Structures are given as structure tokens and as C-alpha cells.
Amino acid sequence: MKNLFYFCVLIFNTTFLLAQETQTESTIDEIIVTAEFNDVDSYNLSSSISVITENDIFRRSANHLEDLLFLAPNINYSTGASRGKFYQVRGIGERSEFTEPVNYSVGVIIDGIDFTGIALGASTFDIKQIEILRGPQGTLYGANALAGLINIVGNNPTEDFYSEVSGSISEFGGSDIGVIISDTNDKNFGYRLGLKNSKNDGFIKNIYLNRDDTNNIDETIARAKFINDFDTTKLTLSIFYADIDNGYDAFSLDNTRVTYSDEPGYDRQKTTAASVKFEKTLKNNDIIELLGSFADSKLGYAYDEDWSNTGICNNTPCDSKLFGFDWWYSSFDSFNRDNENHTIDLRYISSFKDINWVIGLYNRDQDINLIRQYTYLENDFKSSFDTRNSAIYGQFTNNFTNNIKLQAGLRFEERKAEYIDNNGPAPEDFYCIAIYPKPESCLFENNYSRSENFWGGKVSLQAQLTENLMIYGLLSRGYKPGGVNIEGNINEQNLNYDSETMWNYELGIKANNQNKTVFLQTSIFYQDRDDVQTKQSLVTSIESGIEGGDCPCSFSDYIGNAASGINYGIELELLLIPSNKLEIFSSLGILETEFKNFISYSHINADPSNGIGYDLSGREQSHAPKYQFNLSLNYNLSEYLFLNLNFEAKDEFYFSDRHNAKSDNYSLFNFVIGYKKDSYELNFYGKNITDEDFQTRGFGSFGNDPRKFYVTEQYNQYAAPRIFGINGKKIF
């Protein structure tokens, strides 16, 4: 930690000295963060936060949140299927979702709508900015923000009539087109409407089906915002609609982008969502806010479990002609969820002399109904998971002097969860024993209910040392509820898992220069985690039913607890404008993670049948690369022509806590050559121009290739190869 601090100070001093000599007319725009209770300049926030702007989104031709996360330090993601929809902040977060009810570590909010767990719909269309808050957000968002929060803010209506048409074409059949119209009538009522469709064949070639679109993208996004603003009242209605029908055919037995599946899967989401925000300013300038939201989503996720076809063994060592039986197996797995989420948040914001404070009440109801259809299930698996979160919270800020500010917040939350499924034991009567497959009348229900109380909060002290230099210290606490594992073959000691808590310690520096041509923020953090929740899997032989037996295998995912863990590191962001022609942005994340006192019985090297676990104490946590780096240069070649160069690098990381498979470290180069004049902009771009093969997801605890007689090996899901494209927009 000491070396990290010295490094931070060195970077700051070097940059600050450089900035004093910088001569330029261009300055850094003020960035207002909306995720806090009060809108505030990011410079004045005593926490680690990254803000990605609308301009960043367009120039990188980014259709989804996953396309932009490399700009922020210590943020990672797992693809899950077609898109990144599971996020990790400082090495903490989920990587997948199957049958078990999941409690998330990273919250996702879009215009006040809770998109946590449904982030496949995290489109960047008509977005003003993306705010990434690192560390526990216990005061703000409670149980869904142990690791951090991603707040996506849409554009507001314009004061004058505005219309925009945008589009793009790219390799692999990529195309999209978007339309936006906006206006404000008499300065009181404003509207903004947008519609966009994005399509892409994907970069997978299925040679069995002779198709190149089995991993396709087909996404339609519609947004609307209406604002009625009077002197003392303001009403904002935000509407969101997503219709996503993407393919899923990502894993290859050969670890390439060439697949053999005979039943490609899908990754779907249809969401209708809205939020209503009412703001009332009282005579004493106090404010009452009431925010309500709902999101109704139908989610579908399916895959060809064998990744192959019935003829995969023909003329290979596993050919049935040599053995008299088939080595291959065929199975298909699908998960279809109805996810309904309702929230209401009432808060009172006030100020008195040098003290600002807020107090609020919060309630969230979520109902998730799942139907799983799987080749080896006698009956469809059905479950219902209902949760209610109720909280009271408060926060105050005391400006002791013009230079010293203390902020403290506290949140008390009660969570009630009820779970039920049809995976219980069958009645032991003759009818149910003799009939196959068993009718639903023969299935008992597993029931689970849990009620827990939590508290989280923060205390920060901020000092303005000079007009251009601020330092802060932060102590915060976050939490994540426990739950139940519902797979029928999970042993008794793994049926339940405990809540996780975390203490976050942080020191930070934020600075700019007199000319507003340099902005630097850096922080050092240490996170102490207790009862760390970890995703694990039970591998069972289909033929013998033995845990850890010979494959082909079925997989039962469950969540367990490590005794403790630590996550610590540094985050740095630097924005520099040395001249009117050049803008430089860089970010760096350094991360160290470690399990403490963790004996895993699901690790590939464990022997659970004999009660022998594998000691993961001291090992790095999964999806936690030790470094992430980004460097972006934007150079104005002429009045209308610009060049943007981007370099990003990421260290290797474990894919899971139950095996030793890792990603490769990688470095990517991207560029944009753009022409912008008056009301239109046209960009030619290249992504991953050196055509690096890098992975976003992987497995390493089983074998799935009958041609190799199911020997255990690593399987990877690859990100996109080199892609060139053109995007543009016209404003009318």
C-alpha cells in the first residue's frame, strides 16, 4: 500500500508541474454527477467515480455498456451470453445466473429505473453520461450496491426543436439506425423521443449448420422523456422499451470462433419500464422528491450444452464403429424468466446555514418467476423468488469552514425473501414411483423464506488544501444478503449461504490547474470482506451420478461463503489538454485480491466424496485483473478533421473460484478518424486493429469434447476480432 501511495503522489506532482506550463484556450468542462442525493461537480465528491460522456459513446460507436468499461479503472465484466450483463467492480461481482436466486453486488440504474440483473438492456442510445461509482453505496442504494453502482443518465428535452438521425455500418453485417426528436413548449413542457435498431451477424462461424449468424445481435431500443417544469414543481416521466433477440453460440470445442452446435441458443430480453420523479421546492428552498419506477422484463437464455452435433464423432477416434456405442451426448438447456421490479423512494432535502441533510424512505418489490427446460429433467423446473427491501436512510454534510467538509450517511434496511420451486421430493406412493416422467402432481415444493436486517453507511472528511487541490478520506460499509441453493443434489451443508459485509477504506486526491486544462483524480483503497459469497459448481457424471465422476457431466451451480477476503489497490484518471489541438485521457487501475481462510469443496482439485477440500487461502479472486490501463489521444488535424487513438490493456484473471483456468492478458489498439462540421459528423473507426484474441469468459473444470474422450481442458469465449466500420449523424 505504501508503494501505491508513493506512485500516486509522483503522478500527481509530475502532472501538476506539466500543467503549470500548459498554454491553451480549451478547458475541461464541468461534470455534474446525478447519482448523489444532490447534483454535484465530480471534483467535489469525496469518492472514486468515473464519468463517460455522450461524446465518448458516439466516437467509439458503442451500442452497449460493455463497449465502454475499459475507460474506467478496476471495472470488469462477464459476457454471460451475447452481451456483458454481469459486472465486477474492484474484483467484486457476479459472473453468471442460472437456476439459483442471485443477490447482486453491482447496481445498475437507468434514469431512475433499477436495471440490476437485467443489464442486457443497458443500451447507450441517447445517453448523456454514464457514472461509475466504485466502492459500497450502502447509503445510496443499499443491498444491490456492495461493490459499486453504474448510473446511466439519459438526455433531457432540448429548449428548442431538435431532431437527429444516426446510423452505422460495420463488418460482420453490422448496421444500426437511430432517430431522435425533442422540443420544449413555452419553457414548461418538454419531450424527447428516440428509437434505434442495431443488427449484427456476429463473428462466429457455425460449420455444422453452415451459418455465420448463430451469435447474432438484433436489438431495438425506444426511449422517451417528458418534463413538466414550473416555478416550484417539476415532474419527469422516463419511459424505456427494449426488444432484444440475440443468438448464443459462443463456445467451440476447438477453442476458436468456429462452432459445431446443432441447436444454437439465444439471449433475449423484452423490457417495458418507466420512472416518475416529482420534485417540489418549498418556500424555505427545501425539496421534497418522490421517485417511483417499474420494470417488467421477460428474459430468455438458452444454449446447446454439448456444443456439438450427432455426427461429431464420425471418422474420429470416438467413432461408434470402433466401439459399438456412441461417445457423444446431446442436451439443450433453457432458462426463461419473468422479472417484475417496482421501487418507490421518498426523500426530504434541506439545508441550514453550513449543514445540508437528507432523509428518505425506500421500498423495492421484485418478483422473479423461472421456467427451466433441460434435456435431463423429468419435468420443467419452476421457481418463484419474491423479495421486498424496505429502508430508511439519511445523510448530512457539514461545512466546518470554507475548506473542511464532513459528510456522514447511514442506511437501515430490512429484506424479506420468499422462494418456492417444484424440485422437492416426490411422494412415496406407487403411482408416483411407477410413472415416468413424473407428473407435477407428484412433485413436492421446496420452500424457503428469510428475513434479514442490514445497515450500511459512510463517513468522509474532505479538505480543500488550495483552490485547485482537494484531498479526502472515506470509510464506508456495504452489505449483500444471504440466500439459499436450490439444486436437488446439493449436500446439506451447502443449502444456505450467509450474508456478506464489507468495510471500505479510501484516501483520494482530486486536482486541477488554474487554467482548467488538467484534471487528476486518484485514490487508494482497502476493502475488508467478511463471509465472501463465491459462485461454485458441482460437476456430476451423467452416466454414474458420481460427483466429480467421468464426463459427460451435468453441472449444478451454487453459492458458498469464504471466511474472508481482501481487495486493495489504486485508481487513477488523468485528463490533460496541452493545446487547442490535443486532448489526452488516461486511466489506470491496480488491484490486488486475496481469499482468507477459504476451503473449497467444489474446486477441481478437491475430493468432496472423501471430505477433502482445496485450500484457496491466499489465491486471487476471480475476474479481478491486477492491472487495467487506458490511454486515449484526440488530435484535431484541422478545423473539421480529428483523429482519436486509443490503447487499452488488461492483465490475466481467473474465470472462476472452482478451477485454475485464466484469461490471457491483452493489449488493444483502436482508432477513429472523424469529420465534424456544423450539424453533421462522420467517423471511420477500427476496433482491435491488431486482431488480438482475448477472452471474456471461460471454463476449466470439465471436458466436453467426445473426440478427446472428454478429457478436462480449458474452454474460452472470445471477444470480437478486428472490426472496421463507419458511423455518422445528422442534426436537423
Image (cartoon, helix red, strand yellow):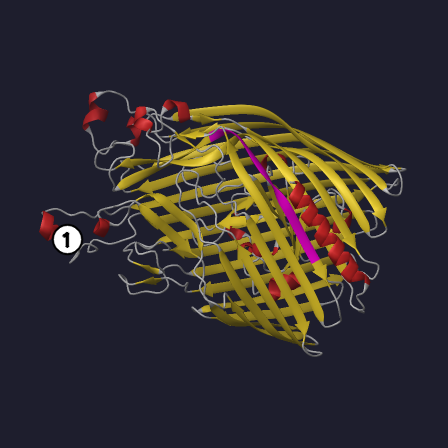
Look at label 1 and name its amino acid: Asp
Res. 609 in view: yes
Vertical comparison of 455 with 670: above or below: above
Decide whether the magenta segment is chiefly helix, strand or loop: strand
Q: Say which quarter of the image contains residue 520.
A: bottom right
Tell me what residue is drawn at x 79 percent, y 47 percent.
470
Residue 446, compared with residue 187, is above or below; it is above
Residue at (83% x, 45% y) in the render: 464
Q: Which residues are magenta?
A: 561-574
Q: Is residue 696 above or below residue 100?
A: below
**Residue, x 36% and y 60% (percent of image)?**
257
Left or right: 705 with respect to 174? left
Extreme-top residue of the structure: 428
Q: Which residue is mark 1?
A: 319
Q: Nearer the viewer, residue 217 or 9?
A: 9
Q: Position of residue 229 (x, y in %)?
A: 77, 52
- Residue at image point 74% right, 47% down: 509
